[in-house]
Image (spheres, helix red, strand yellow):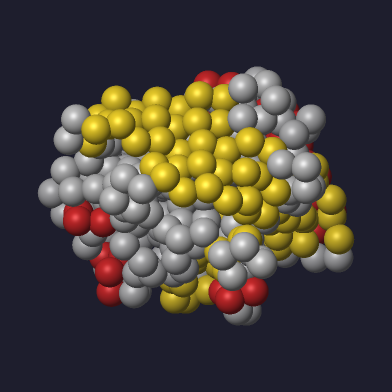
């Protein structure tokens, strides 16, 4: 069913946040600390932004439940700094991006729900069923997967992270958009239900404290799908650096192609020494992607046998 949105994308365009800049900084810091992630995520306020810095690698189950795999495996990033404006201002036109639109309080980037490239503004107003990462079984049971850069991120409500939050509940902020506005769960912060069609095209609505807020939802778009706040240049927003192998293969690791019909029995395992393995079957044959930290900082030795590569075993060292 196609979701209907209000005819006017936003009814509070002229609304201004109540929080002063220092209060907004304190709110970003508190959202991470109160959730219990301060040991993994740092927040520093510099000028008019709060920088939420992490390795984007969560401490919860990963990759379990994926069928439509893109044959990418999650690898920690190095000092990913997510900028959260401390004086957010609403705009009049939603902005889209084929990359993270925000960051969860555990430091994991948050994307829109699609996996088919950047949406146009027109695309926002009808469900992208063929690119819906949830419906096409591209996501794990926690709401995320590894993207083209072998970077883990969420595309829908981060349920496993929320289960870990010490302050889990409707009033808890679960993330921040890159326009400076907070992201909450399915309900209003006071616990009341959000009526159908209240949320705008970006999955947000007015907020008394911040001026505006985003929500997750049980139906598409499931989570923030565009930025309603002003962002001078979307191209300046951060991306996780790709894995590269200079001097070995002359560039980055190639992205996988989802095997037709999906894979079976995908299992992701992690060892205390940093070794990771993703094993799965496809049409009765076994495939895998494995890596371990190498002697070079921020580098990993890989061994893969993927459907994308026709079952050939490939090895190499890749670095962020």
**Which quadrant of the view contains residue 76?**
top right
- Height in image: 157 above or below 270? below
Q: What's the residue at 28%, 69% (across, down)?
A: 123
In the rendered image, the residue lying farthest to the left is 1
254 left or right of 6? right
Q: How many marks?
A: 0
**Which quadrant of the view contains residue 265?**
top left
Q: What's the residue at 27%, 43% (across, down)?
A: 68
285 left or right of 106? left
Q: Position of residue 143 (x, y in %)?
A: 42, 36
| Residue 5 visible, this orientation | yes
Q: Nearer the viewer, residue 299 or 154?
A: 299
- Height in image: 240 above or below 94? above
Q: Position of residue 261 (x, y in %)?
A: 16, 43
Q: Position of residue 111 (x, y in %)?
A: 47, 54
1 left or right of 163? left
Q: Position of residue 109 (x, y in %)?
A: 57, 49
Q: Nearer the viewer, residue 67 or 157?
A: 67
Q: What's the residue at 79%, 47% (across, down)?
A: 297
266 left or right of 32? left
């Amino acid at each position: 069913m196609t979701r209907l949105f209000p005819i006017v994308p936003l009814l509070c365009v002229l609304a201004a946040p109540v929080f002063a800049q220092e209060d907004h900084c304190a709110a970003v810091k508190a959202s991470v600390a109160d959730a219990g992630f301060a040991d993994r995520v740092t927040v520093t306020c510099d000028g008019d932004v709060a920088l939420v810095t992490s390795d984007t690698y969560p401490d919860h189950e990963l990759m379990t439940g994926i069928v439509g795999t893109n044959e990418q495996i999650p690898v920690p990033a190095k000092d990913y700094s997510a900028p959260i404006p401390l004086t957010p201002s609403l705009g009049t036109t939603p902005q889209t991006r084929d990359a993270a639109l925000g960051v969860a309080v555990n430091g994991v980037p948050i994307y829109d729900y699609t996996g088919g490239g950047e949406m146009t503004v027109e695309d926002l107003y009808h469900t992208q069923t063929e690119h819906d990462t949830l419906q096409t079984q591209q996501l794990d049971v926690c709401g995320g997967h590894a993207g083209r850069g072998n970077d883990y991120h969420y595309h829908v409500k981060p349920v496993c992270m929320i289960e870990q939050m010490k302050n889990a509940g409707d009033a808890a902020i679960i993330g921040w958009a890159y326009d400076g506005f907070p992201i909450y769960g399915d309900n209003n912060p006071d616990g009341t239900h959000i009526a159908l069609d209240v949320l705008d095209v970006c999955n947000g609505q007015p907020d008394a404290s911040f001026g505006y807020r985003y929500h997750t939802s049980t139906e598409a778009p499931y989570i923030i799908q565009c930025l309603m706040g002003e962002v001078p240049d979307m191209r300046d927003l951060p991306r996780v650096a790709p894995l590269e192998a200079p001097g070995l293969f002359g560039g980055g690791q190639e992205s996988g192609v989802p095997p037709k019909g999906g894979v079976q029995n995908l299992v992701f395992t992690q060892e205390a020494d940093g070794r990771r393995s993703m094993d799965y079957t496809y049409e009765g044959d076994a495939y895998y992607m494995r890596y371990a930290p190498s002697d070079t900082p921020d580098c990993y030795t890989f061994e893969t046998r993927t459907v994308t590569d026709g079952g050939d075993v490939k090895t190499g060292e890749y670095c962020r």
